[in-house]
Image (cartoon, rainbow, N blue to C red):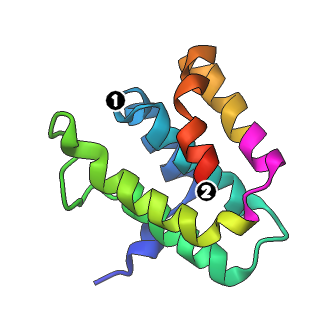
């Protein structure tokens, strides 16, 4: 059986975001984007990138503990995995990464979505 992290690719990440981003909601997408941009940062150590890839692979995987098609609860396991990874690599989330993630969110959800992100930013 293939390792879950073998399922991660940048293309599959963007495909999942574009297809399910609105349904998942701005908080899930924001945390996923924070991790994605952290992964792309050259100053982040390999061990942290491994944590990020594992979490993003779970996010894009069609096999979930709670299937994404389940109303309301479908993305709670994804958010839990993403937030756990974010907690582990939080020291590497800088203002540049936050700004990139927020700019992409505003493109997709509009500026009002930024009001819902304060609790996430406060935990980083």
Residue at 38 percent of width and 74 percent of height: 4
* Res 27 visible: yes
For mark 1, what is the residue? 23
59 in magenta: no
Badge 2: residue crowd in 10 Å (few <14, some 14–19, many ≥20) = many
Q: Quadrant of residue 30?
A: top right
Q: Quadrant of residue 103?
A: top right
Where is residue 23? Give x, y as percent. Answer: 34, 29
Q: Name the quadrant of the N terminus.
A: bottom left
Where is residue 121? Give x, y as percent. Answer: 63, 45
Residue at 48 percent of width and 32 percent of height: 26
Vertical placement of residue 43 versus 1, above or below:
above
Vertical placement of residue 57 versus 101, above or below:
below
For mark 2, what is the residue? 35
* Res 17 visible: no
Q: Earlier in the sequence, mark 1 or mark 2?
A: 1
Magenta stretch? Answer: 92-99
Check contact, mark 1 vs mark 2: CB within 8 A: no
Q: Secondary structure at mark 2?
A: helix
Residue 27 in the figure: left or right of residue 61: right
């Amino acid at each position: 059986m293939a390792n879950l992290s073998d399922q991660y690719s940048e293309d599959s990440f963007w495909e999942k975001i574009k297809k399910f981003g609105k349904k998942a909601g701005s908080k899930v997408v924001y945390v996923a984007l924070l991790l994605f941009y952290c992964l792309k940062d050259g100053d982040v150590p390999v061990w942290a990138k491994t944590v990020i890839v594992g979490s993003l692979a779970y996010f894009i995987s069609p096999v979930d503990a709670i299937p994404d098609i389940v109303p309301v609860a479908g993305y709670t396991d994804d958010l839990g995995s993403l937030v756990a990874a974010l907690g582990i690599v939080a020291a590497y989330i800088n203002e540049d990464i936050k700004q990139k993630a927020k700019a992409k969110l505003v493109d997709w959800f509009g500026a009002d979505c930024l009001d819902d992100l304060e609790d996430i930013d406060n935990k980083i």
